[in-house]
């Protein structure tokens, strides 16, 4: 047997929402079973794209850092941006990708704080690039809640 996580979650969610929940007395347990089914669908969708989303986002952040490093006047921050931009994924395990994403996002926050504080034309361009990436990041996380 080859387990298929998305298929399993879809079948289990469907069972919870169409068989288990209606068989329960109306109220808390029934709504909890239905909500659990909906959460399983969302989890299945996220599990399917988890690695791809993080790889895309980590790459976008590294590109942003490479572009910003040339315009940052603080040599220490510019060096850290260049180092982060040159980084690559150590593994494609979701936990490792998430850890790398957390580090990159911490640097993004620092860069964003610096850009907002400076207010120069260069800093404003960096700030605008950060906001564009944050908007794309939000789109990447959007759940479709579609069928499996």
Image (cartoon, rainbow, N blue to C red):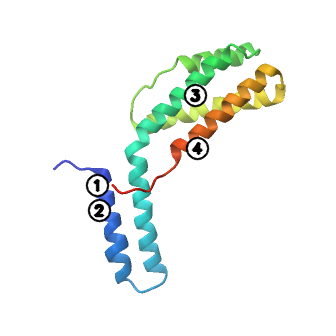
- Crowding at mark 2 (Cα within 10 Å: few <14, some 14-19, many 20+): some
The mark nearer the N terminus, 1 or 3, is 1
Mark seen at residue 51: none
In the rendered image, residue 72, in percent from the top left (x then y), is placed at 73, 17
109 w.r.t. 81: above or below: below
Q: Residue shown at 41%/42% (left/top)? A: 49
Circles 1, 2 touching at the beta carbon (< 8 Å): yes
Q: Residue shown at 63%/38% (left/top)? A: 134
- From the viewer's perspective, is 69 left or right of 85? right
- Inter-mark Cα distance, 1 to 3: 32 Å
124 w.r.t. 42: above or below: above
The residue singled out by tag 3 in the image is 61
The residue singled out by tag 1 in the image is 7
Mark seen at residue 11: 2
**Callout 2: helix, strand or loop?**
helix
Marker count (numbered): 4
**Callout 1: helix, strand or loop?**
helix
- Inter-mark Cα distance, 1 to 2: 6 Å
- Crowding at mark 4 (Cα within 10 Å: few <14, some 14-19, many 20+): few
The mark nearer the N terminus, 4 or 3, is 3
């Amino acid at each position: 047997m080859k387990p298929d996580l998305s298929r399993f979650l879809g079948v289990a969610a469907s069972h919870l929402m169409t068989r288990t929940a209606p068989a329960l007395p109306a109220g808390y347990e029934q709504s909890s079973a239905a909500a659990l089914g909906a959460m399983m669908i969302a989890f299945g969708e996220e599990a399917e794209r988890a690695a791809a989303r993080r790889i895309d986002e980590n790459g976008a952040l590294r590109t942003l850092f490479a572009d910003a490093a040339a315009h940052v006047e603080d040599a220490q921050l510019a060096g850290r941006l260049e180092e982060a931009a040159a980084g690559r994924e150590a593994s494609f395990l979701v936990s490792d990708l998430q850890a790398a994403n957390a580090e990159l996002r911490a640097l993004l926050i620092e860069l964003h704080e610096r850009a907002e504080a400076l207010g120069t034309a260069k800093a404003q361009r960096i700030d605008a690039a950060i906001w564009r990436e944050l908007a794309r990041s939000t789109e990447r996380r959007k759940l479709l809640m579609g069928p499996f």
